Image (cartoon, grey):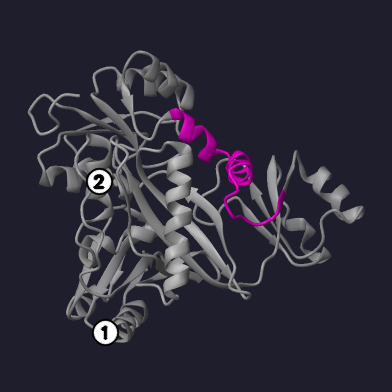
Amino acid sequence: MKQPISSDFKLGILGGGQLGKMLTLAASNIDVNTYVLDPNGECPAVTTCTGLTVGSFNDYDAVYQFGQDKDVITVEIESVNIDALRKLEGEGKEVYPDTNSLSIIQDKGLQKQFYKDNKIATSAFALYEDTDAIKAALANGTVTYPFVQKLRTGGYDGKGVAVLKNEADLNLLLEGKSVVEQMVDINKEIAVIVARNIKGEVKCFPSVEMEFNPKANLVEFLFSPAAISDAHEQEAEQLSRSIVEHLDFVGLLAIELFIDNNGEMFVNEVAPRPHNSGHQTIEGNMTSQYEQHLRAILGYPLGSTAITLPSVMINILGEEGYEGNVIYDGIENCMAVEGANFHIYGKKITKSFRKMGHATVIDKDLESAKKKANYIKEHLKVIA
């Protein structure tokens, strides 16, 4: 690999959303040139990357041509064209995470089978080709209410997921190849960000706890550190290490975990990139998840993951019922909150529950940080 901190090194990133923007900002701190492929010429990363190519990261030709002059290629979204990346790999391009990892993670069915094959704790599941097959399984008792249906590909931020509690919810079934899991009594939802570099070094960030918006089915608050036992913390790290090592994974992997009412822990799903559950690391940890991802894929030693101060991350979501040119109503008062750090992504148009930014509140006391984060939730409204 060329020296990454040099004028002729080119890091290619598939995707220029908020994760791509924050990744390019981290890269600029160590003078790494970043080139982004995204279908939107006004994507968040356009103001922070070295160069933007407008094109689809799902299109074979667009991805293949984009990768031709890049020294290392990475992703900020997993729904990319694997065939083009595999061709680039075959021609000697360095792609991290590699296409083997990406192809497994892209498909939730393959993900679940990977956990089963490698004896990694996960909830019981079955795979179905379509809604008719699920209905037939309901009729013969193979599937019972309540259960969760997840489309095998294309889902994100709560999309592509249906929760069916009883027969009245049958209209919620999603058409397509699916994973079906029986509902579990969940006590806590936590996440671990784990990194593995090209030399095989592995480091985990301490677990964080997630609280979801009940309407949007996406994370609203994140608490660091998670309120879990030392035993559960150790188990979460062991599961995370097991996954990256079995995948031979290079880069950053976000692992979502459930702890049920019996204290059992199991993997829900993973994302092969920086993740919403690691935003707080920018202010709350010694190394941000974005810098850690760069260290991993560029061959540098991994940074310390230690918590500097307790933190609460709040997603800044578009208010329900609003769509149009964005207005951040009340942000002046919220910016006066001590310890509050704002990251506005630069999206021009707001929509109901669209992720428009996030704020991380750091404080010596987690409960105090939670109160400040709740103040921001109540007083900052993203409207049009």
**Side of 24 where 316 appears, left or right:** right
Q: Nearer the viewer, mark 1 or mark 2?
A: 1
**Residue 23 numbered mark, or none:** 2
* x 11%, y 43%: residue: 30
- What range of the chain is rendered magenta? 99-125
Is 128 on the left-hand or right-hand side of 190?
right
Q: Indicate the amino acid at tag 2.
A: Leu
Residue 279, given in percent of the width and then of the height, sits at: 31, 60
| Magenta stretch encompasses residue 378 | no
Q: Is residue 74 above or below residue 145?
A: above
Task: For residue 319, say whether it is visible.
Answer: no
SS class of the residue under badge 1?
Answer: loop
Neighbor class of circle 1 (other Cα within 10 Å; few <14, some 14-19, many 20+) is few
Who's the residue at 67% across and 67% down the image?
Answer: 184
* Residue at (42, 36) in percent of width and height: 248
Q: Kindly give the residue lying farthest to the right in the view shown.
A: 140
293 with respect to 9 (left or right): right
Height in image: 134 above or below 165? above
Return the mark for residue 365. Answer: 1
Residue 102 is inside the magenta segment:
yes
Tell me if label 1 and label 2 are in contact, CB under 8 Å.
Answer: no
As drawn, the label of residue 47 is: none
> How much space separates mark 1 and mark 2, taking CA atoms?
29 Å
Rendering quarter of residue 264: bottom right
Residue situated in front as seen by the camera: 378 or 6: 6
Question: What is the x, y in percent for residue 176?
Answer: 69, 40
Can you tell which quarter of the image residue 165 is in? bottom right
Question: What SS does tag 2 mark?
Answer: helix
Q: Residues within 10 Å of mark 2 (few under 14, many from 20)?
A: many
Instruction: Classify the position of the N terminus by image quarter.
Output: top left
